[in-house]
Amino acid sequence: LPRIEHRMCVRHIYGNLKKRHGKQPEMKLKLGTLAWSYNDADYKANLKDIERYDQDVYDDVMKAKPEKWCRAFYKLGPFCEDVENNSTKSFNNSIGKARDKRFVPMLETIARLAMVLIARRDVICSSHEGICTPYVIEMLESLHEKASKCTIQPSTNQTYESTSSGCAHRVSLENRTCSCRRWEITGIP
């Protein structure tokens, strides 16, 4: 599908790097940090860190086209911050029984599997109280301490400047955006 964003799995990128460069102790962490970069400035700093770490690893990282697996390049809108393809593998595993069938029965089996999964999740959702999912609550709790160390300067139109560790970002409550891009990518402020 030509207009769909095609992303690469960082675990596979790391696996390929490991084959070529061995199990270097810091390579996995540095690659993960690069993949989790939400904006261009973080991406460039983390990329420079890899270049200082090992020039050959850096060259192979660049061959792996980071724009296909780094959050700094994600299209905004879907609110999916994943950098690996675990959900795809899970889906492929769940349709294993249907794969051996002819096309129409295969699709009918997949549809039934999806209905069962949706019904199970509906039971969980129906019993949930609160405005946030447990995942969001956990994420907000982990960010709370970090946020308490920010210096906030108000502007107009529900816009603020948030400064932490010498790095400043513009936050718009009205547009639900932050210049770090994290809010736009995750959907979580």
Image (cartoon, rainbow, N blue to C red):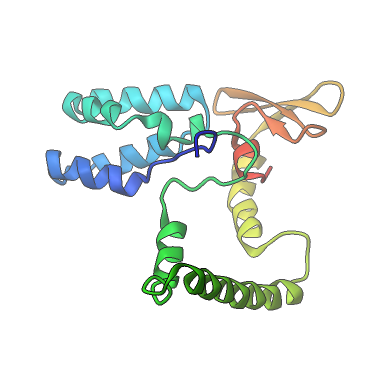
Q: Please, is residue 66 above or below residue 128 in the view?
A: above
Which quadrant of the figure has residue 27?
Answer: top left
Q: Please, is residue 124 above or below residue 51 in the view?
A: below
Which residue: 50% across, 74% down? 105
Which quadrant of the figure has residue 108?
Answer: bottom right
- Expressed as whole percent of the image width and height from the top left, the position of residue 20 reads 13, 39
- The answer to whether 145 appears left or right of 109 in the picture is right
Q: Please, is residue 30 above or below residue 128 in the view?
A: above
Q: Nearer the viewer, residue 105 or 27?
A: 105
Q: Is residue 53 visible?
A: no
Which residue: 43% across, 27% down? 43
- Expressed as whole percent of the image width and height from the top left, the position of residue 141 reads 63, 55
Single out the residue that lies furthest toward the right: 157
Quarter of the image with the C terminus is top right
**Number of numbered discs present?**
0
- The answer to whether 108 appears left or right of 144 in the picture is left
- The answer to whether 158 appears left or right of 111 in the picture is right
Q: Is residue 98 visible?
A: yes
- Expressed as whole percent of the image width and height from the top left, the position of residue 60 reads 22, 30
Q: Nearer the viewer, residue 185 or 7?
A: 7
Which residue: 70% across, 73% down? 122
